[in-house]
Image: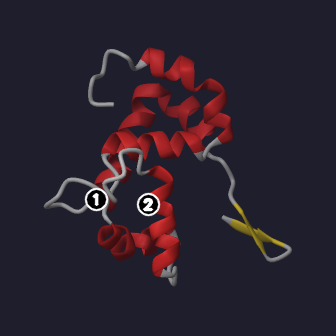
Amino acid sequence: MATRDGAVVFEDFFPVMVARLGARGFMEELSKGFRLLMDKEKGVITLESLRRNAGMLGLRGMSDEDVRSMLREGDLDGDGSLSEREFCVLMFRLSPGLMKGSKEMLEEESTDSRF
């Protein structure tokens, strides 16, 4: 993450990761990221677990509303938390480079029912 004229600019490294790790390896890395952020007892990313782990993402000092907005962005079923599937979908949506090749990647991984 870098700043340009005071605005946050995110560099999209996901396409490079896919190229290096392959589709399966990349999905495994996303799963590891999910597990780092999730509430261990509930098995989902909650407001509290995301707030608690925001520092690992380089997002220290985020307001509660910012954290809630992040959750809302990916919460497809409206339960106030992110399942592993919702987390992976959100990561794809946030990466313009992955969105271009996501159909092929998902087809390659279609035999893995975890995602």
95 in relation to 63, above or below:
above
Q: Quarter holding the N terminus?
A: bottom right
Q: Which residue is mark 1?
A: 38
**For the residue carrying disc 2, how many other residues have a C-alpha within 10 Å: few (<14), some (14-19), or many (20+)?**
many
Q: Nearer the viewer, residue 69 or 33?
A: 69
Dot 1: what SS?
loop
Q: Amino acid at mark 1?
A: Met
Residue 24 is marked as none
Q: Quarter holding the C terminus?
A: top left
Identify the residue at image location x=40%, y=27%: 24
The reply, left or right, for residue 9 in relation to residue 101 is right
Q: Amino acid at mark 2?
A: Leu
Disc 1 and disc 2: Cα gap in Å?
12 Å
Identify the residue at image location x=46%, y=15%: 107
User: In terms of image quadrants, where is residue 64?
Assistant: bottom left
Q: How is the image coloured?
A: secondary structure
Dot 2: what SS?
helix
The reply, left or right, for residue 69 in relation to residue 6 is left
- Residue 25 location in percent, x, y? 41, 32
